[in-house]
Amino acid sequence: MAAEINRKNTVAAAVLKGDLWTRLSMIFMGAGLFGHKQKIKGIIVFVIELAFIFFMAGTGISRLAEFPGLGSVESGEVFNEAKGIFEYTKGDNSVLILLYGVVTCFVIAAFIVLWVLQMEKSYALQKDIENGEHVPTFVEDVRSLADGNLHITLMTLPCLGILVFNIVPLAFMICMAFTTYSKEGNHLILFDWNGLTQFFRVLNMNGNIGKQFWSVLSWTVIWAIFATFLNYILGMILAMIINRKDTKGKGFWRFCFVLSIAVPQFVSLMIMNIMLQPYGAVNVILQNAGLIKSPIPFWTNATLARITIIVINLWVGIPYTMLQVTGILQNIPEELYEAARMDGAGPATIFFKITLPYMLFVTTPYLITSFVGNINNFNVIYLLSGGGPTYVGDTAGQTDLLVTWLYKLTIDQQYYNIGAVIGILTFVVLTIVTLITYRNSSSYKNEEAFM
Amino acid sequence: MTAMELKKENKRPLKRRLGNLAVHLFLALLAFIWVMPIVWIVLTSFRAEPGSYVSTFFPKGYTLNNYIKLFTDRAVLNFPKMFKNTLIIAIFTCMISTFFVLSVSYSLSRMRFSFRKPYMNLAMILGLFPGFMAMVAQYYILKAMGLSEGAMIRYALIIVYSAGTGLGFQIAKGFFDTIPKSIDEAAIIDGATQWQVFTKITMPLSKPIIIYTVLTSFIAPWVDFIFAKVICRANGDQFTVAIGLWNMLQKEYINQWYTCFAAGAVVISVPIALLFLYMQRFYVEGMSGAVKG
C-alpha cells in the first residue's frame, strides 16, 4: 500500500502540502517519521544525517575541494638545518585524491537518495494518518523484513558488494580516462584532469596509439565473429551428428568431448601453448616424422598465430555449444522435418531452412552473451599467444584483443589513462553490437514465430 | 519412420551402412583430437625425463617422482602451501557467493519491488564492461582498506571473488522461475512468511541449483589467475594454485618444473573434472531453462 502511494507523491508535493513535521524533515531528516508515529525510525534517520554532517565536516569537504585539482604538492626533500638532515615532505597523491573524491561523491549521492526517500515517506505517513490508516510500528517493520520486505534483507549485502567492488571501481576507472595518469611524462603520483585528449589520441588514425587501436579493434571484431559463429555452427553440427538415430554409443561420444571442458581452461590453454612452441611436442614430432623441415612458427607469424588461436578456440568452444544446444535441438518439432522430407528437401536444405532458423530464434540471447564473452575473452589470448607477435615500438601485439591490450597498458605499461579509454570504448562497441543484434533478432521482432 | 524411408533403407542398405561407418569414423577422429591433449598431459605427469622438449609422444620412462616433488619440494615453489591457500579462499568464497547468488536470484524471481527491473538492467550493463577493467581500482580500494599486504591478501581475494557474485543470478533465477508459484501462494495462505517460503519450501525444492551454485563458486578461485596475480603481486607465500602453475611454465622454472606442472595440472583437474561431470546435467538444465525464458 505504502509503496503505491510513495510513487504518486513527489518531493514537491511533500514540500508544498506537507504539515509541520514533514516540512521540518527538509532540514532535520527523520522529523517527519518521528512526528508521524515512527519514532525509532525517525531517530535512526536523524543519526545518519548527523553522521553524514560529521563526515563531511571532518574529511568530506576537504576531499571534495581537492577533487577538481587532484592535488599539486610534490613530495620532496627539505634540508633541516637544525638537525642537519634531509627531511621528506609528504606530497599529494592524485590517485588517492581521485579515489576518495569518487567515494565522497557516492556518499553524497546516497545521502540525497535517503533525503528524497524520507521526504516521500514522511508525506505518505502524514496522508495515512489523515486517512486514518494503520501506521506500522517499528516491530512490525522489522518483522516485515522476513516477510513482505524479504528482498531488502536478502539483497542488501549483495548490493553493497556490487556497489563497493564493481560500481565504485568502475566510476574510478572511467574518471581515469579523463586524466593524465600515466607513466608517460612521469604522471604516476601527481596528475591532472585532461579532458578528452586521450580519447582523441586513441581514435586518431594517424598517431601511433591510434593506429594500434584501429588494428586491435578490427582483429577483435574479426576474432569475435569467427569464434562465436564457427563454434556455434560446428558445435551444432557435432550435436546433430551425435543425436542422429543411427549413431551408436551417444553417451560415450558426448563424454569424450565434455572431458575437455572439465579440465580447467587455463590448464589446457597453457598446455596448448607449450605444445606449439618452436621446440614443443608438435613441431618435434612432425620433424622427426619427416613431415616438415623447420619448426612451424605458430606463435611468431602474425597470420598463423591468428589462425592457430581461432582453431584452438574451436577445440575449447565446440563442446560447450554441443552441451548447450543438445536439449534445444531435441525440442524441434519432428513434424517440421517430416514435412520437409516429404517435399524432397535434402539434409543441407533442411539444416539451413529449418534447423538453423529455429536455433537462431531460440538461442539469440545465448549468441549475444557468447559474442560479448568472446570480445572480452582474456584467457584464450593471454595464455596462448600472450598477444604476440609484437612489433617493435608497439604496446599491442598482433593477436591482442582490446581486453588483453587494456591489461598490458594498465598492469605492465602503467598507461592507466589510455587503458581506461580502451575499456570505455570496448563497452561502447559491445553496447552497439548487443543492441543492434538484439533489435534485429527474430526473437525480438517476432516473438511467436515458432509457438 | 515413414513407409517411404523404410523402402529406401531396404533398397540401399549397403550405402546406408557405409555412410554410418563414415560418420562413426569421423566421430572417432574428432574424439581423438579432443582427448589427445589430455592424454598427453597425463603421460607427461608420469614422465621420467625432465624438461619440456621431447621427441616422442610416449615417455621413455615412467615415474611417480613428479608428484612426489610437487608435494615435497617446498623451497622454490611451495605447492602444498598454495594448495592450502586456495582451499581456504575457495571455501569462504563458496559460502559467501552461494548466499549472494541464491538471495538475489530468489528475490528477483519471487518478489516484486521497485528496483527489480533497474537492478536487472544494471547487471546487464555492468556485464558489458571488461571484467577486470575495474581491477586496478579494486586493488586501490583494498589497499585503502589495509588488505593488500601479507596475510590480509587472503581476505582481499575472498572479497574480490565473492563481492560481485550478486550479478550472476541468471541461471539460478531461471531455475526458480520454473518452480510453480502456486506452491508459495498455498503456503502464504496457510500463514507462512516469505522467509519461511524461501527456507522451508523453495530451498528444499532447489537442490540441483544449490549444488550447481556451490560447485561453480568453489571452482572459481582454483581457475582464476588474473585477479590473484594482480592482488598477490610478489607475495610468494600467498600464491594460489593457478599462479603457481603459471609460474612453473615461466622461463626460469620451466626446465625443472615442466613435468611437475603436468602433475599439478592433473592433481587440480581430476577433482574439478569429477565435479563438472557430476553437475553437467544441472548446467544443461539451467541453460535450457534460462533460454526458454
Image: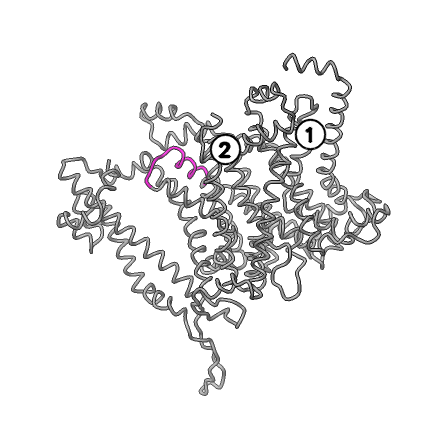
At 50% across and 70% down in the image, what residue appears?
A187
**Type of secondary structure dominating the magenta stretch:** helix
Which residue is outermost to the front? Answer: A343
Crowd tier of the residue under label 2, counting other residues whose Cα lies within 10 Å: few below 14, some 14–19, many 20 or above: some
Q: Secondary structure at mark 1?
A: helix
Q: Nearer the viewer, mark 1 or mark 2?
A: 2
Q: Nearer the viewer, residue B232 or A383?
A: A383
Mark 1–mark 2 distance (CA, rounded to whole Å): 25 Å
For disc 2, the marked residue is B291
Q: Nearer the viewer, residue A296 or B6?
A: B6
Q: Quadrant of the N terminus of chain B?
A: top right
- Is A296 contained in the magenta span? no
Residue B10 image-quadrant placement = top right
- The residue type indicated by label 2 comes to Val
At 56% across and 61% down in the image, what residue appears?
A409
Magenta residues (range):
B101-114
Crowd tier of the residue under label 1, counting other residues whose Cα lies within 10 Å: few below 14, some 14–19, many 20 or above: some
What subunit carries mark 1?
A: A
Residue A153 image-quadrant placement = top left
For disc 1, the marked residue is A253
Which residue is outermost to the bottom? Answer: A81
Residue B275 image-quadrant placement = top right
- Is B113 contained in the magenta span? yes
Q: Residue B98's spot in the image, x, y percent?
A: 48, 39
B208 left or right, relative to B40 = left
A111 left or right, relative to A440 = left
Q: Is residue B140 above or below residue B181?
A: below
Q: Nearer the viewer, residue A155 or B6?
A: B6
